[in-house]
Image (cartoon, helix red, strand yellow):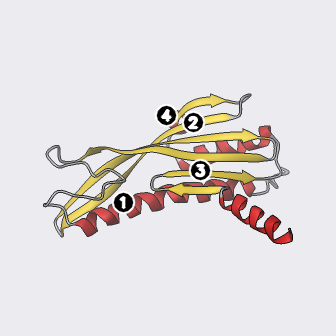
Amino acid sequence: MKNLIIIFFAVTSLNAFSQENFKWDKVIEVNKTQTDLYSSTKEFIADYWKSANNVIQNDDREGGVLIVKGITKHPIEFNKINVQYYTYAYTIKFYLKENRCRILIENVFCESGEHKDLKLIQPNDTEYPKYYKPEKCKATQQSLKYTLNNIVLAFEEHVKKENNSNW
């Protein structure tokens, strides 16, 4: 029976943070009120994105929901002198409750590239046009994955940080 309980907790703790190809979902347990988490999340958004007012699509203080639409640019190097940048869009949903919050990153897609005639490399693509080097495309996809994963890690660190400003 003791082993079953240990296995149950091990499996449920793995579900606290799931990352499928280009979708992140993490629940963070933290000893803060919903109001404190809301303030901390708004502060995180203001610090992380250059223009918080432009990226926030939904701001529901009472319901504890903030939705952000962001973009990030990543290069694909064709050769030493030909580097093309692709713009990837994503949606982040922050859900806030007493003593816990959830960050969900989804709807990641390539919305544009610098050169209109080149095929857009989507996050989950596994086949690429012949003029792309697969390792370069995969490197771009890994870079995108790294960027989005860092948002989750930075958010977790931010909300867990104690606010000791007694000015």
Ranked by sequence position, the earlier of labels 2 and 4 is 4
- What secondary structure is marked by label 2? strand
* Cα–Cα span, label 2 and label 1: 24 Å
SS at badge 4 = helix
Residue 26 vertical position relative to residue 42 in the rendered view, above or below? below
- Relative to 104, residue 20 above or below: below
Q: Cβ–Cβ below 8 Å for labels 3 and 2?
A: no
Tell me: 165 left or right of 79.
right
Q: Are the residues tagged 2 and 1 within 8 Å (C-beta)?
A: no
The amino acid marked with disc number 3 is Asp
Residue position for label 2: 67
Amino acid tagged 4: Asn
Q: CA distance from mark 3 to mark 4?
A: 23 Å
120 vs 70, left or right, is left
Which residue bears the numbered disc 3? 25
Residue 10 percent location from the top left of the image: 73, 66
* Residue mark closest to the camera, 3 vs 4: 3
The answer to which quarter of the image holds residue 11 is bottom right
Q: Measuring 50% from the left and 37% from the top, which residue is drawn there?
A: 55
Identify residue for label 4: 54
Q: Residue at image x 59%, y 50%?
A: 25
Q: Give me the C-alpha separation between circle 3 and circle 2.
A: 14 Å
Please state which amino acid type lies under the numbered disc 2. Answer: Ile
Q: Quadrant of residue 109?
A: top left
Q: What's the residue at 34%, 56% (across, down)?
A: 74
Reading the chain from its start, which is encountered first: label 3 or label 2? 3
| Local SS, label 1 | helix
* Residue 29, position as x, y percentages in the image: 76, 53
Distance from the alpha carbon under mark 2 to that under mark 4? 11 Å
